[in-house]
Image (spheres, rainbow, N blue to C red):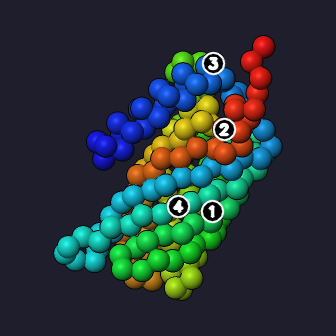
Amino acid sequence: MARAGALALLWLLAITQLFGQDARPNPGPFILPVEVSDGFISGRGSPVPLTVSLRAHPSVVPAPSWQLGATLAVSYRNPQVETLGGLRAVVHILQLPQAFHGYAASGGIFAEALYGTHSHQFIYLGGQVDLGGIMQFGLRSGRETRAGETYWEGFLGTDVVSLLRSVLTVPQ
Protein backbone atom coordinates (compact mmCIF):
# COMPACT_ATOMS: atom_id res chain seq x y z
CA MET A 1 0.00 0.00 0.00
CA ALA A 2 2.97 2.31 0.64
CA ARG A 3 4.12 1.79 -2.95
CA ALA A 4 0.65 2.75 -4.22
CA GLY A 5 0.74 5.92 -2.09
CA ALA A 6 4.18 6.87 -3.39
CA LEU A 7 3.08 6.19 -6.95
CA ALA A 8 -0.03 8.34 -6.45
CA LEU A 9 2.05 11.21 -5.10
CA LEU A 10 4.55 11.03 -7.97
CA TRP A 11 1.72 10.86 -10.52
CA LEU A 12 0.00 13.86 -8.97
CA LEU A 13 3.20 15.92 -8.94
CA ALA A 14 3.94 15.03 -12.58
CA ILE A 15 0.41 15.91 -13.70
CA THR A 16 0.41 19.24 -11.83
CA GLN A 17 3.74 20.18 -13.40
CA LEU A 18 2.56 19.23 -16.89
CA PHE A 19 -0.85 20.85 -16.84
CA GLY A 20 -0.41 23.77 -14.45
CA GLN A 21 -3.37 25.45 -12.79
CA ASP A 22 -6.26 23.59 -14.44
CA ALA A 23 -9.03 23.72 -11.87
CA ARG A 24 -12.20 21.83 -12.72
CA PRO A 25 -15.16 23.45 -10.97
CA ASN A 26 -17.64 21.94 -13.44
CA PRO A 27 -16.85 18.43 -14.72
CA GLY A 28 -19.41 18.71 -17.53
CA PRO A 29 -22.45 16.54 -18.24
CA PHE A 30 -20.47 13.32 -18.91
CA ILE A 31 -17.42 11.81 -17.23
CA LEU A 32 -15.52 8.57 -17.75
CA PRO A 33 -13.50 7.58 -14.67
CA VAL A 34 -11.16 4.63 -15.27
CA GLU A 35 -9.34 2.94 -12.40
CA VAL A 36 -7.12 0.06 -11.37
CA SER A 37 -7.75 -1.60 -8.03
CA ASP A 38 -5.93 -4.11 -5.89
CA GLY A 39 -6.98 -5.83 -2.69
CA PHE A 40 -7.76 -9.03 -0.87
CA ILE A 41 -10.71 -11.29 -0.16
CA SER A 42 -11.55 -12.19 3.42
CA GLY A 43 -13.65 -15.18 4.34
CA ARG A 44 -11.96 -17.73 2.07
CA GLY A 45 -9.37 -19.07 4.50
CA SER A 46 -5.61 -19.17 4.22
CA PRO A 47 -3.67 -18.10 2.24
CA VAL A 48 -5.71 -14.94 1.68
CA PRO A 49 -6.67 -14.65 -2.01
CA LEU A 50 -5.95 -11.43 -3.89
CA THR A 51 -8.15 -9.46 -6.24
CA VAL A 52 -7.18 -7.07 -9.06
CA SER A 53 -9.56 -5.23 -11.36
CA LEU A 54 -9.73 -2.69 -14.16
CA ARG A 55 -12.92 -0.62 -14.04
CA ALA A 56 -14.62 2.06 -16.11
CA HIS A 57 -17.51 4.15 -14.79
CA PRO A 58 -19.32 6.01 -17.62
CA SER A 59 -21.48 8.52 -15.73
CA VAL A 60 -23.67 11.56 -16.10
CA VAL A 61 -23.44 14.51 -13.72
CA PRO A 62 -27.01 15.75 -13.09
CA ALA A 63 -25.82 18.06 -10.27
CA PRO A 64 -22.34 19.23 -9.22
CA SER A 65 -22.27 16.87 -6.23
CA TRP A 66 -23.87 13.80 -7.88
CA GLN A 67 -22.70 11.23 -10.42
CA LEU A 68 -24.97 8.48 -11.69
CA GLY A 69 -23.84 5.79 -14.08
CA ALA A 70 -22.65 2.30 -14.70
CA THR A 71 -19.62 0.22 -13.81
CA LEU A 72 -17.94 -2.09 -16.30
CA ALA A 73 -15.07 -4.19 -14.96
CA VAL A 74 -12.70 -7.04 -15.61
CA SER A 75 -11.71 -8.64 -12.33
CA TYR A 76 -9.20 -11.31 -11.38
CA ARG A 77 -10.26 -12.99 -8.17
CA ASN A 78 -7.94 -15.83 -7.40
CA PRO A 79 -8.29 -18.25 -9.24
CA GLN A 80 -10.65 -16.87 -11.93
CA VAL A 81 -11.21 -13.90 -14.23
CA GLU A 82 -14.70 -12.43 -14.43
CA THR A 83 -16.41 -9.52 -16.15
CA LEU A 84 -18.76 -7.40 -14.07
CA GLY A 85 -21.39 -4.80 -14.82
CA GLY A 86 -23.91 -2.79 -12.86
CA LEU A 87 -25.00 0.55 -11.46
CA ARG A 88 -23.01 3.16 -9.53
CA ALA A 89 -23.92 6.36 -7.65
CA VAL A 90 -21.46 8.88 -6.19
CA VAL A 91 -22.23 11.73 -3.79
CA HIS A 92 -19.50 14.34 -3.24
CA ILE A 93 -19.82 15.47 0.36
CA LEU A 94 -16.75 17.71 0.57
CA GLN A 95 -15.72 20.35 -1.98
CA LEU A 96 -12.41 22.19 -1.77
CA PRO A 97 -11.89 24.72 -4.59
CA GLN A 98 -8.24 25.02 -5.62
CA ALA A 99 -7.07 22.82 -2.75
CA PHE A 100 -3.84 21.49 -4.23
CA HIS A 101 -1.77 23.43 -6.77
CA GLY A 102 -4.94 25.03 -8.16
CA TYR A 103 -6.89 21.81 -8.59
CA ALA A 104 -10.38 21.59 -7.20
CA ALA A 105 -10.66 18.62 -4.85
CA SER A 106 -13.68 16.73 -3.63
CA GLY A 107 -14.32 13.85 -1.32
CA GLY A 108 -17.22 11.52 -1.78
CA ILE A 109 -18.89 8.26 -1.00
CA PHE A 110 -20.22 5.76 -3.52
CA ALA A 111 -22.25 2.59 -3.88
CA GLU A 112 -22.15 -0.04 -6.62
CA ALA A 113 -24.36 -3.02 -7.37
CA LEU A 114 -22.57 -5.38 -9.78
CA TYR A 115 -23.42 -8.64 -11.48
CA GLY A 116 -20.74 -11.00 -12.77
CA THR A 117 -20.47 -13.53 -15.56
CA HIS A 118 -20.09 -16.40 -13.06
CA SER A 119 -23.47 -15.66 -11.39
CA HIS A 120 -21.87 -13.53 -8.70
CA GLN A 121 -23.65 -10.54 -7.19
CA PHE A 122 -21.70 -7.78 -5.43
CA ILE A 123 -22.57 -4.77 -3.31
CA TYR A 124 -19.71 -2.26 -2.88
CA LEU A 125 -19.49 0.83 -0.67
CA GLY A 126 -16.52 3.15 -0.55
CA GLY A 127 -14.96 6.55 -0.31
CA GLN A 128 -12.92 8.48 -2.85
CA VAL A 129 -10.93 11.66 -3.27
CA ASP A 130 -11.06 13.39 -6.66
CA LEU A 131 -8.36 15.92 -7.53
CA GLY A 132 -9.83 17.93 -10.37
CA GLY A 133 -10.77 14.81 -12.32
CA ILE A 134 -7.11 14.29 -13.13
CA MET A 135 -6.56 11.81 -10.31
CA GLN A 136 -8.91 9.81 -8.15
CA PHE A 137 -8.05 7.42 -5.34
CA GLY A 138 -9.90 5.69 -2.56
CA LEU A 139 -10.95 2.55 -0.75
CA ARG A 140 -13.91 0.27 -1.18
CA SER A 141 -15.35 -2.75 0.53
CA GLY A 142 -17.71 -5.18 -1.11
CA ARG A 143 -19.72 -8.23 -0.31
CA GLU A 144 -20.39 -11.11 -2.67
CA THR A 145 -23.96 -11.86 -1.63
CA ARG A 146 -24.08 -15.55 -2.59
CA ALA A 147 -20.70 -16.81 -1.32
CA GLY A 148 -20.50 -14.50 1.70
CA GLU A 149 -17.01 -13.23 0.85
CA THR A 150 -15.85 -9.72 1.72
CA TYR A 151 -13.62 -7.75 -0.64
CA TRP A 152 -11.27 -4.94 0.42
CA GLU A 153 -9.70 -2.84 -2.33
CA GLY A 154 -7.73 0.34 -2.86
CA PHE A 155 -7.91 2.07 -6.24
CA LEU A 156 -6.20 4.72 -8.32
CA GLY A 157 -7.69 6.24 -11.45
CA THR A 158 -8.41 9.23 -13.63
CA ASP A 159 -11.35 10.75 -15.48
CA VAL A 160 -10.50 10.25 -19.16
CA VAL A 161 -12.74 13.14 -20.29
CA SER A 162 -11.11 15.64 -17.87
CA LEU A 163 -7.64 14.39 -18.71
CA LEU A 164 -8.26 14.83 -22.45
CA ARG A 165 -9.77 18.26 -21.83
CA SER A 166 -6.60 19.26 -19.90
CA VAL A 167 -4.29 17.95 -22.60
CA LEU A 168 -6.21 19.52 -25.47
CA THR A 169 -6.73 22.94 -23.84
CA VAL A 170 -4.34 25.51 -25.24
CA PRO A 171 -2.89 27.84 -22.56
CA GLN A 172 -3.56 31.53 -23.17
Does residue 128 appear anywhere in the picture? no
Whether label 4 touches label 3, CB < 8 Å: no
N-term mark: 2 or 4: 4
The percent position of residue 119, horizontal first and vertical second, equals: 53, 86
Q: Label for residue 163?
A: 2
Q: Which residue is mark 3?
A: 21
Query: Which sits in the foreground, 24 or 123?
Result: 24
Q: Circle 3: is it few (<14), some (14-19), or many (20+) Cα within 10 Å?
A: some
> Residue at the bottom extreme?
119
N-term mark: 4 or 3: 3
Whether label 2 touches label 4, CB < 8 Å: no
Say if 117 sits above or below 90 in the image. Answer: below
The percent position of residue 99, horizontal first and vertical second, equals: 54, 21
Q: Which residue is mark 1?
A: 71
Q: Which residue is mark 4?
A: 54
> Residue at the left extreme?
46
- Amino acid identity at mark 4: Leu
Q: Residue at x 38, y 67 (%)?
A: 51
Q: Secondary structure beneath disc 3?
A: loop
Could you tell me which quadrant the C terminus lies in? top right
The percent position of residue 127, horizontal first and vertical second, equals: 48, 47
Whole-Å distance between the Cαs marked 2 and 1? 19 Å
Tell me if 39 is positioned left or right of 72 in this view.
Answer: left
Whole-Å distance between the Cαs marked 3 and 1? 30 Å
